[in-house]
Image (cartoon, rainbow, N blue to C red):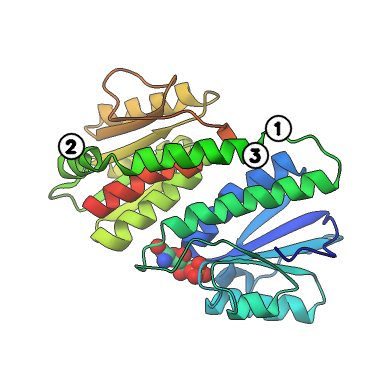
Amino acid sequence: IHLVGLDIPKRVYIVACGTSYHAGLVSKRLLEQIAHIPTEVHIASEFLYDQPLIGDKPLFIFISQSGETADSRGVLDKIKKQGYPTLAVTNVQGSTLYREADFKLLTHAGPEIAVASTKAYTAQIAVMALLAIHLANVQGLQSPVDMFRELRTISTAMEALIEKKALARQIAHEYLTGKHSCFFIGRLQDYAVCLEGALKLKEISYIQAEGYAGGELKHGPIALIEEGTPVFVLITDSRIAKNIRSNAEEVRSRGANTCIIAVEGLDHQGDAWVLPRVHPLLTPLVSVIPFQLIAYYA
Ligand code: M6R
């Protein structure tokens, strides 16, 4: 950890691409709810040409497995020239982002084995959770979560989920055989995880997959639901469990084949996969795993 001298920022700008951007979306909630720091998440290739107005005392956080992604490096260059502080969250010590950022955190996910990012994503979220706790502690804020205990519990839950290979294989077979397009729907954090689920599936199976916020479906994309369209529905937050179930009902009534993945306590009979309940802020660490495995088996 190289955070010595890091001042508490008034606003955080997360910049990343692809899966790392999706980890950024989850991290925004961690930084805002644990460290109380307003956070924006930007796609690096967009930020390069369309920089937003930068507030007082910003911190730029670059999340990147490789530490070499050209778009993120481009933004780092640009931001450094403007004199703002930068932090790299990367898996590769000695990478360009690692070397050039003012502050650095290593994700320690181990070497990348395949281009589809899986463990890098969860490690990025875990490290951002630790950063959020650090920034809360420095401000004397009480954390809403006993982070170290929770992360230990979650790692056990993740190991157990990774063993559910037969279930993932059966779901992939049942819902995706012969299919050319599908949806992943969720709300709040589940929406962020759905974006990642859809990216993973399309990247490695070549099946068109769209991640959508459940409430947005009716504003256009529902037109694409036809008899047998697979729709993966993620439900981990009690505040929106009812709403997302009714979104699932809407698509089912148009013929969709819904595969519901719900956290225990919010599950109903007939759901395809019941996830262990962990702290709501950290649920993406477990809820992404079924999607990763289903993509693999698809
Ligand atoms: O190395 P990076 O995290 O900066 O890479 C960014 C994206 O290219 C990467 O996350 C990509 O989306 C994943 N490999 C997809 O699985």
- In percent of width and height, residue 189 lies at 53, 40
- Dot 3 falls on a residue whose secondary structure is helix
Say few, some or many: other residues with alpha carbon within 10 Å of mark 1 (under 14 / 14 to 19 / 20 or more): few
- In percent of width and height, residue 156 lies at 45, 38
Disc nearer the start of the sequence (2/3) = 3
Disc nearer the start of the sequence (2/1) = 1
* Amino acid bearing label 3: Met
Q: Residue at x 52, y 55 (%)?
A: 123
Q: Residue at x 73, y 75 (%)?
A: 79
- In percent of width and height, residue 240 lies at 51, 26
User: For the residues carrying marks 2 and 1, which lies nearer the camera in this image?
Assistant: 1
User: Viewed as shown, does residue 260 lie left or right of 19?
Assistant: left
Position above or below: 163 against 124: above
Which quarter of the figure has residue 275?
top left
Say few, some or many: other residues with alpha carbon within 10 Å of mark 2 (under 14 / 14 to 19 / 20 or more): few
Residue carrying label 2? 227
Query: Does the image show residue 96?
Result: yes
Number of marks in the rendered image: 3
Residue carrying label 3? 147
As measured in the structure, the alpha-carbon distance from the residue carrying label 2 to the one carrying label 3 is 44 Å
* Amino acid bearing label 2: Glu
